Image (tube, rainbow, N blue to C red):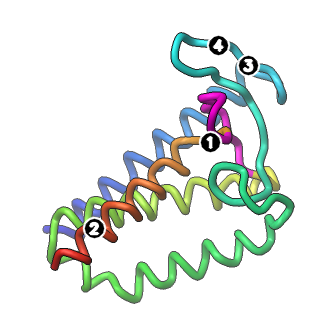
Amino acid sequence: MNKKFFVWVLFLFFLFDRFSKEFVRFFLDLGDGFSLKLFSINHVVNTGSAFGLFKDNNLFFIVLSFVVLFLIFYYRNDFLNDKRKTFFVGLITAGVLGNLFDRLIYGAVIDFIDFHFWPVFNVADSCISVGVIVLIFLFWND
């Protein structure tokens, strides 16, 4: 059943996002980081949208998150009949919930993945971005 699949995808990616952010919060002070070969882990906070865009709009993005979650719930029958769409909507939902959790609890989103040529981001941002891009492709080709 795709509802269970949706919940599992949402749950697993939400947990992965939470674990990664809490790991960064626990081991790195704000502004601290360390470098790996391909990228750095840098603890920053973001009051804007994904990838640091539209800073200082935390309240707007809280409201937007609730609107997106409502729309996903309202249109759930449009994706639950297709396992691929269910997976990517689950990714988006996990990402929205992960960043919404940060905004409500910490007042900003915890970002930490830094490729130096791209704004710092997190797992939830990646889930939202990948989910939206693939869903556009899937709905376009229906």
The amino acid on which the numbered mark 1 sits, given as a three-letter code, is Phe
**Which amino acid, mark 2?**
Phe
Drawn side of residue 3 relative to residue 121, left or right: left
Circle 4 residue: 35
Q: Residue at x 75, y 59 (%)?
A: 48
The first of marks 2 and 1 along the sequence is 1
CA–CA distance in space, label 4 to label 1? 15 Å
Q: Residue at x 62, y 42 (%)?
A: 121
**Nearest-to-viewer mark from 4 and 3:** 4
Amino acid tagged 3: Gly
Residue 20 lies in what quarter of the image? top right
> What residue is shown with label 3?
33
Left or right? Give the position of 85 relative to 113. left
* Mark 4 secondary-structure assignment: strand
Query: Disc 3 and disc 2: Cα gap in Å?
Result: 36 Å
Q: Which mark is residue 17?
A: none
**Residue named by callout 1:** 121
- Of badges 3 and 2, nearer the viewer stands 2
Report, in whole angstroms, how far the alpha carbon at label 2 lies from the one at label 4. Answer: 34 Å
Front residue of 100 and 121: 121
**Which residue is located at x 51 percent, y 76 percent?**
69
Span highlighted in magenta in the image: 109-119
> Disc 3 on helix, strand or loop?
strand
Q: How many marks?
A: 4
Q: Earlier in the sequence, mark 2 or mark 4?
A: 4
Query: Do the CB atoms of the residues marked 4 and 3 lie less than 8 Å apart?
Result: yes
Secondary structure under the numbered disc 1 in the rendered image = loop
Q: Residues within 10 Å of mark 3 (few under 14, many from 20)?
A: some
Q: Position of residue 91 (x, y in %)?
A: 39, 57
Cα–Cα span, label 2 and label 1: 23 Å
Please identify the quadrant where the N terminus is shown.
bottom left
